[in-house]
Image (cartoon, rainbow, N blue to C red):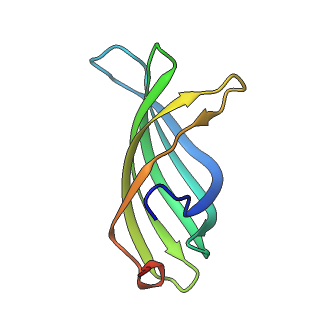
Amino acid sequence: MLGEKIGEISGKIIMQRVLPNLGGDPKIETSFQATGSVLDTNVSDTGTYWTVLRTDGTQYGEDQGVMIIRDGEMATWTGHGVGVRNKDGTATYPRRALFPNHAPTMVTS
């Protein structure tokens, strides 16, 4: 499972704000709501992340949130990673997410 894609989620931004950053590069906080599937299970996902937009075109960010599964089970998650900005204004952001409090439905052997 290491390195495998385990799901896909898409949604909408519900809030953004610019944060102070002593390092100088722009730092933006974003909160979102999304839906999709993880491990073939439908999920609703709400979270907040911050991203530092680096001058070399990369981005570094950290995030946290909660996933609610169709049966009402919940899983909290945290993550971090480095991404790149694409020419069309989107970002490619492969992330590693950790689920310290997992929902039993999402446990695999």
Q: Residue at x 52, y 59 (%)?
A: 4
Numbered-mark total: 0
Nearer-the-camera pick, 13 or 6: 6
Q: Residue at x 52, y 19 (%)?
A: 57
In which image quadrant can residue 5 be found?
Answer: bottom right
Say if 55 sits above or below 60 in the image.
above
Residue 36 in the image, given as x and y percentages of width and height? 64, 65
Residue sitting at the far right: 88
Residue sitting at the far left: 22
Say if 15 sits above or below 24 in the image.
below
Nearer-the-camera pick, 96 or 29: 96
Residue 92 in the image, given as x and y percentages of width and height? 58, 37
In which image quadrant can residue 80 be found?
Answer: top left
Say if 80 sits above or below 1 in the image.
above
- In the image, is 42 to the left or to the right of 20? right
Residue 17 in the image, given as x and y percentages of width and height? 47, 32
Residue 109 in the image, given as x and y percentages of width and height? 41, 82
Q: Residue at x 63, y 63 (%)?
A: 35
